[in-house]
Amino acid sequence: MKITIARLRSNVKYNGPLETVLDSFFENYVKWMKQNPQHEYRTYNVSFGKDRPNRTPENIEWADVIVIPSDSEFRYHGELQMNPKDLAKSESHMEKIIPFFEGKTVIMWRSDRGDTEELYRGFIPNIKKFITIDEIDFPGNIHGMKYHFIQTLKNPLADIIGTEKTTDFAYWGRMKTGHDREKTIRQIYRSELSTVMIGGFPSGIKRQSAWIKDWKQLYPLLEPARSTLCFNWIDQTATTSRYPESLSIGMIPFVWRDYDTNNTYRIDDFQRVQSPEEFIQKVIQLRNKDFFETKLEEFKDNYKRALVSESQYFKLFSKKMDIGLDESL
């Protein structure tokens, strides 16, 4: 089959793990292409290796199947945080390729609850078949891959002498509007807790840096922190990459209210908080080094019961890609 992987909005230059949000999917896709030389492969706004990503509408037109690595597509559809000029520029690119989706199969890698089949069909008409490979279709979330990836950044001496924890709370990423997240993060920031904030935040919150994609730069900023807080929206049964990321860094992830209601991550009751006040009180307890280290190891062990190996993630990803291609026929 003719397969084009397409980033519809921002580009991806994939050279390996920990350089892009969807590295867990990309790493498995690279392996899958090598194992399936019977197919033909092209790219749109994606590159592998040294080449720069290029927008090549002809590769969308050429393809039988279009693979869309999707994160935050919903921001281009009424999201207040989107810059109007950036939106107009992006839409001008979309106008050129939308006609080429007619009668094609789309396989979406989903890493955001706001990115749905309904959303895509709403602005790309006449897609023949739409198949979703969701991050939560995998044990411990496909971003359990990030747990393994981040382990490679650790200084081998850290396990022997330990890492000095000097900051109470870290948060990295972008805000989503319309629920408790902004209000809660603001209250935490204004509390007695020391913080490290990386990414996009509401007014009044001073950040240490804008969003950093490259984990080799992000990791040293987050490593001194003891805790973070995981939120969900739209679907409370879903999980997010922040949870395995934080455990791999050596940070305790707390979760907000009904996050992961099926408890696929094996979350301890201590980690689940109902209010900013409860969260702050629990994080203060972590200033006791022995208490922090005991809880961190306990929560890591719990998550590892859900986590699978990189090779197991690849087997599951391969099976889902193969099924997707079979369904496209």
Image (tube, rainbow, N blue to C red):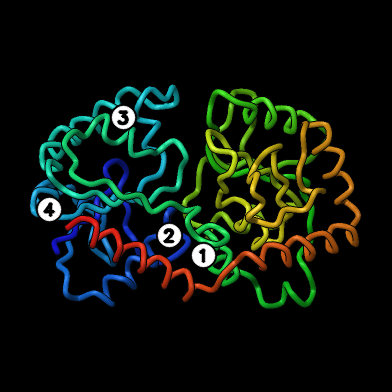
Mark 3 element type:
helix
Front-most of 100 and 129? 129
| Alpha carbon separation for disc pair 4 and 1 | 29 Å
What kind of residue is marked 4? Asn
Mark 4 element type:
helix
Mark 1 element type:
helix
User: Looking at the rendered structure, which numbered label has been put on residue 86?
Assistant: 3
Instruction: Return the disc, 4 or 3, that comes first in the chain's sequence.
Output: 4
Point 24% across, 49% down: residue: 106
Instruction: Return the disc, 4 or 1, that comes first in the chain's sequence.
Output: 4
Task: Using the rendered view, name the quadrant where residue 159 is placed.
Answer: bottom right
| Alpha carbon separation for disc pair 1 and 2 | 8 Å
Instruction: Return the disc, 3 or 1, that comes first in the chain's sequence.
Output: 3
- Of badges 3 and 1, nearer the viewer stands 1
Cβ–Cβ under 8 Å for marks 1 and 2: yes
Instruction: Return the disc, 2 or 3, that comes first in the chain's sequence.
Output: 2
Question: Which residue is denoted by mark 1 in the rendering?
Answer: 145
Front-most of 314 and 284? 314
Q: Position of residue 39 (x, y in %)?
A: 17, 69
Sort mark 2 into few (<14), some (14-19) or many (20+) by Cα contacts within 10 Å. many
269 to 235, vertically: above or below = below
| Alpha carbon separation for disc pair 3 and 1 | 31 Å
What kind of residue is marked 3? Asp
Task: Using the rendered view, name the quadrant where residue 153 is placed.
Answer: bottom right
Question: Which residue is denoted by mark 2 in the rendering?
Answer: 23
Mark 2 element type:
helix
- Of badges 1 and 2, nearer the viewer stands 1
Question: Which residue is denoted by mark 4 in the rendering?
Answer: 59
Number of marks in the image?
4
Point 54% across, 73% down: residue: 309
